Every structure is written in structure tokens, then in C-alpha cells.
Image (cartoon, rainbow, N blue to C red):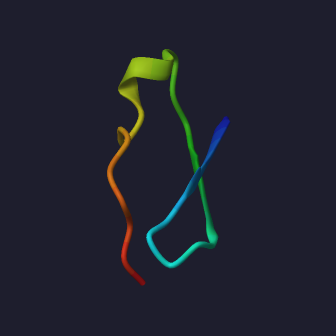
Amino acid sequence: LMVCARYTRRGGLDINPWRSTCAEDGPGPRLVRQ
């Protein structure tokens, strides 16, 4: 289980957990709009 945290345009933190065997299998550095 990996957790990726990055900044959003709103100035908040976007924390995305996902299961992966390699870091490159993650969702990538795209912004998630909620």
C-alpha cells in the first residue's frame, strides 16, 4: 500500500492511497478534482 500526497490548485493537500508493486504503477502526478 502506497500513499501519495501532493498539492492541489486549491492550495490543499490531495492524499491518494493505492496498492502497487511499483511506484510507477500509481495514478501519476495529475490533479484530482473533488
| Image quarter of the C terminus | bottom left
From the top left corner, tell me how far across and down residue 3 is, in percent: 66, 42
| Image quarter of the N terminus | top right
| Residue 4, above or below 14 | above
| Residue 29, above or below 17 | above
From the top left corner, tell me how far across and down residue 33 is, in percent: 36, 77
Residue 15 in which image quadrant: bottom right
From the viewer's perspective, tell me whether residue 20 is left or right of residue 4: left
Residue placed at 58% from the left, 73% from the top? 11
Residue placed at 55% from the left, 37% from the top? 19
The residue closer to the viewer here, 1 or 13, is 13
Residue placed at 63% from the left, 72% from the top? 12
From the top left corner, tell me how far across and down residue 32 is, in percent: 38, 67
| Residue 33, above or below 19 | below
The residue closer to the viewer here, 20 or 26, is 26
The residue closer to the viewer here, 28 or 6, is 6
Residue 9 in which image quadrant: bottom left
| Residue 18, above or below 20 | below
